Amino acid sequence: MPLFLAVSAVLGILVGSFYTSHFSGNRLSIINSGSNRLTNMLHFIDDQYVDEVNMDSLVDLAIPKILAELDPHSVYLTAKEMQLANDELKSSFSGVGIEFNIRQDTLHVQNVISNGPAERAGIIAGDKIVTVNGDKFTGKKLTNEEAMRRLKGPKDTKVVLGIERYGHKKPLTFTVTRGEIPQKSIGATFMLDETTGYVHIKSFAEQTWPELLVALASLSQQGFDNLVIDLRDNSGGYLQSAVQVANEFLPKKKLIVYTQGRKSPRQEYRSDGHGSYQNIPLVVLINEGSASAAEILAGALQDNDRATVIGRRSFGKGLVQQPIEFSDGSMLRLTIARYYTPSGRCIQKPYTKGDERDYAADVMNRFQHGEFFSEDSIKHTGPKYHTGLGRVVYGGGGITPDIFVAEDTLNITSYYSQAAASGLIFQFAFDYTDNNRPRLRKIASLGELVKLLKRENIVEKFASYAEQHGLKRRNLMIQRSHRLLERYIVCRIVYNIMGEQALGEYLSTDDPVILETKRIFSEGKAFPKKTAESKKQVARYKQQKIAHGTGHSSLTSIDALA
């Protein structure tokens, strides 16, 4: 009997297998829905497809198409893309310490990080890197990504660079020991006038808040009474960094931002009252390039009537992404919540699922509809909200400034647009700097450099250069756009010779937004309004020593990118 049962069981299995294979045509039976279907499909392709398939590449192509059906900010990053994205928000990376650009298939050193590995090895701005570790480093295949891959590397490792230098007939060789290169999220910091400090926040990275404290301490030593925070073209970064910065300027228990989603309960971020600059008159500058964490800061200060916001309407990104890492180093940034300003508005602009083109073209559409030139052209799609003082603010499409300043396009001509879009201004400025670097370096001050460039009629030099490189000369257009051309060319040369700080100071001299900011301060219209008590507190700021602690313990941490 046991033998009979065993034989019967084996025969049953064989018969069942035969009929299953015969009638199914060797098809995979997919009986589950949703994610199981996708998993089984990929497994079946890997197992049965007629040709060899690179499954990793197939998945990398498929995931973005799925995420595109959700929202514009849920994205998938490969391991390589993830590394680049992380480097942008870290306070440092390991490399040689240069800023570069690639022109005519050659890497040109634009700037050398002060006291960095490259400077210590003897590399200077204007050098051309032509070999790396003895291998050719020029040609059409040379890209920014390839350059960073070859020049970055683990700390204390060595890289041998072959350099062509102006005035030297033969290439020079330098051995550079890679080291930690600081990456600043705070740009230019200086005094606009005797009483007004200026800080440019380029992004919200790991060390933005400590960097800001250092910048404010420097301005305190120079006696600032008013402060400008420039968030123009700041595309965002870490939500927590924006919260920390807002905390410096808000009284205790003020709501900064809250997040909420279908599976994410409401989470609030409030000030703890430890900020050192709670009463100083404050202006925040924004434009269409200000997004995400920059909008969190601008919205928090506007809704709490703590700062006057000046400029143009911001980008309108109000979605919070949760990073989800995979074992191969790739990452999914999935939208899990929306963030809301203290008044309750979500500033995420409208989007159509699966149509990234319309979303990406929104800023251009706003430009074409005249929004950059007239406050009356701003179209609000969201409901009205109110600040603490009852002022009307709008949701559903970025932060609208309290004071609108139009884009200066009066003297833009097609010649200027072509010159800017073609990159010829950038190329000319670099070539001019390269050919005149020794004498330009001897100039002691920003003012002297600007006067020299104007005396040399830098616009005329550019027009001749551009004509030689294919841009037809248009004398009437050049005359009309002379001020814009001169400003653009000079600012690039100033940056090449003197760096970011000098560039910020030069641009501030005739920036319409800065000029409007100065007017607001001079008339005492910036929030908070100047009172006898606030003046006393400002005076106390100048006398006290600002202690830089380890952080505000009451601020909640969040593992998210905004």
Image: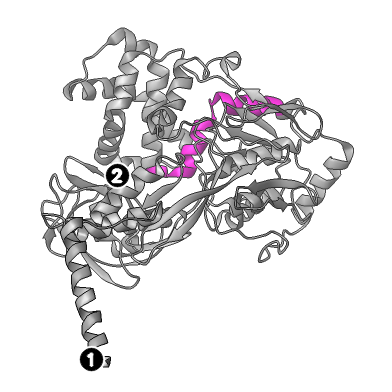
Q: Looking at the image, which is closer to me, 65 or 159?
A: 65
Within 10 Å of the Cα at label 1, are there few (<14), some (14-19), or many (20+) other Cα atoms? few
Q: Residue at x 80, y 29 (%)?
A: 390
Dominant secondary-structure state across the stretch colored magenta: helix
**Type of amino acid under label 1:** Leu
Residue 418 located within the stretch drawn in magenta: no
Earlier along the polypeptide chain: callout 2 or callout 1?
1
**Percent coordinates x, y for residue 385 in the rendering:** 73, 30
Q: Residue at x 46, y 31 (%)?
A: 352
Residue 512 located within the stretch drawn in magenta: yes
Segment tinted magenta in the rendering: 497-520
**Type of amino acid under label 2:** Pro
Q: Looking at the image, which is closer to me, 122 or 131?
A: 131
For label 1, the residue is 3
Quarter of the image containing the N terminus? Answer: bottom left
For label 2, the residue is 438
